[in-house]
Image (cartoon, rainbow, N blue to C red):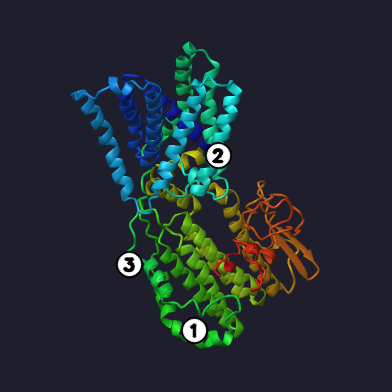
Amino acid sequence: MEFPLAVLLVSSFTCVGLLALWASTSRRHWFVRMAVFVGMLSLLLLIPAQEPFAIFLCQGLVVTIGVQSHRYWRRRTFSTNWTWRFSVKNALLFTTVVAVAVPIAMVLLAEEGLDWHCVWQAGVASGIVVLLAHWCLLSKICSRWKKAGIGLACLLALSAVLSKIEPGGASLIFHIGDWFNSGTWPTHIWFSVCGSVFLALLFLDALANSQRKMLLLSLLLILGAPSIYFYYRLMTPLLPIPQGVLPSPNGYDDLVAAGKMADCRLINFWGETPIEQLVAGLPKYANVYERAELGFSRSVKVPIPYGVMDVDTDSSGALRSLCLAFGARGDVHLDSGDIEKAMDDYLTISRLGSQSRNGGVLTHWLIGTVFDGVGESSLYQMHKRMNASQCLQAIETYAEIKSSTDALEEILYRERVWCERAYGFYGRLSIILDDLADKGIWTNFQIEKDLAPRHRAQHQLLIVALAIRAFEDVHGALPANLAQLVPEFLEQLPQDPFDKTGEALRFQTHGDEYQLYSIGQNRVDDGGSKPEQDRDGLTVHETGDLLLDVVYAPWEAGDAEDEIDPIDAKKWLK
């Protein structure tokens, strides 16, 4: 859990617990204070943030009911002295609570897949924690340290019970779903948050009665500062939706339609379908390829419904089928010795990767990267069978494809705008936390730091490998250095994306063989040595460089699933 998120959780629950105690400990005016408590919580609805409002309200109700029940139990005469009197004031206070709570309940009930147990579980548990600390604060049975030990033991038991009732539910603080549910550490997070609340309240026991009110006010001001900061950031205006009109007709619709006509049970990359069967079955795909070519001839832009949480997975599955269809046809052409047509099919897969991310968000960028990996891997495995003309044509086609592809910065901006609208306050909160950590969006995937540079490095390695093959075909020998490729085969030498000094890719000759590599994610030149394990494209390897012979090595059907390199996305499609 990120440090800013931990600070926000601890400060929020502690502040609400202190406010709930303030609202419930008055003998005469606790109902009035409770109305003020609800009114203060209602500020969250300006975001709107219905889920935390419901949880905090439940926490406050548990604290109030517990405190007043304890008071009634200790003062048996309370039931005879106290009577309810109707007044406009009481009616208005009651109306305030109902007017705020009922609409929120209606909104939450309207949510699909709502797990109410997560709301009451988080609210009741946090309320019990505050009541436990309140009991330790007032009890004179034992010393401060014994009370602390008893309270923490009860807190640990409570966390264990919560995790048994609903595994992961105790960590669902701000959303009714699985935003903070990792499946492994919910109890630890909940225990740390509630333990901080407990200890903050228990600390009051060390002070005299005259000092407690001042300390309560100080704690509210100190702990409220992070919440106020985040609330202020959440209230800032939303980013504007990128302007743009979908083309009509949209080639994206044609590509999706073509993919839906393909039969994935026939086409694959893993040798499970014999070439003879592919040769016999692919003629029925003529309408698939025809519809796809129609889509490529038109303007292509992914339609993004801003404000809708789910991305269209059916479209992604259809594009995957289309990718397999072109790959299968390329394999058939390659097996028959038609290098030109096989190259065109593999380049079409890369074109599909480019078109499938234009106008899209980060999910589409990742899908496009998968298709890029499929096309580039297939082309690299056959590039030594290509002649100079074919290599130069492939380099030119790749340049045209990359020039028509949206930049990653544009995609990340659309991702930010989409998250703000699709995920509500949580999406904006995630962005704020990422901004504070200075890591950008989706930091778990290391998009800007590792994944995007790795993808660029692999592409540039392939371009240089094609240029080296063209040089070898024309001159009958390998170049002595990469500078000899310019300007006959390359306009300029590509830089290594992982090299901060701007150096080009590394090149070494060993007789009739050569080694081409990038220094890789560890950003250290290891002389072209292979990493100890190059199967996880998101891991920063301590040793080893990035080599296409490793990344694009032919995959065997018996490879373990957990050894698949996500960047060699051809293997992902299985």
Q: Nearer the viewer, residue 288 or 471?
A: 288
Q: What element carries label 3?
A: loop
* SS label for mark 2: helix
Instruction: Note whether 438 is above or below 77 in the view shown.
Output: below
* Residue lying at 50% horizontally and 22% vertically, measured from the top left: 137
What is the CA distance from the residue labelled 2 to the residue labelled 3? Answer: 61 Å
- Can you tell which of label 3 and label 1 is closer to the viewer? 1
**Dot 2 amino acid type:** Ala
Residue ID at (38%, 45%)? 424
From the viewer's perspective, is the residue at label 2 or at label 3 nearer?
2
Residue at point 55%, 73% (across, down): 346
What x and y, as percent, mark residue 209? Answer: 48, 13
**How far apart, in angstroms, are the residues tagged by discs 3 and 1?**
28 Å
Residue 237, visible in the rendered structure? yes
Instruction: Say if mark 1 contacts mark 2, CB within 8 Å.
Output: no
Q: Is residue 17 above or below residue 156?
A: above
Residue at the far top: name it: 210
Q: What is the CA distance from the residue labelled 1 to the residue labelled 2?
A: 62 Å
Q: In which quarter of the image is residue 88?
A: top left
- On-image quarter of the C terminus: bottom right
Q: How crowded is mark 3: few (under 14 residues within 10 Å), some or many (20 or more)?
A: few
Residue 32 or residue 395, whichever sits in front: 32
Q: In which quarter of the image is residue 221?
A: top left
Task: Give the secondary structure at mark 1.
Answer: helix
515 shown above or below 131: below
> As drawn, which residue projects farthest toward the right?
511
Along the horizontal axis of the image, is 484 left or right of 213? right
**Label 2: which residue?**
157
Tag on residue 282? 1
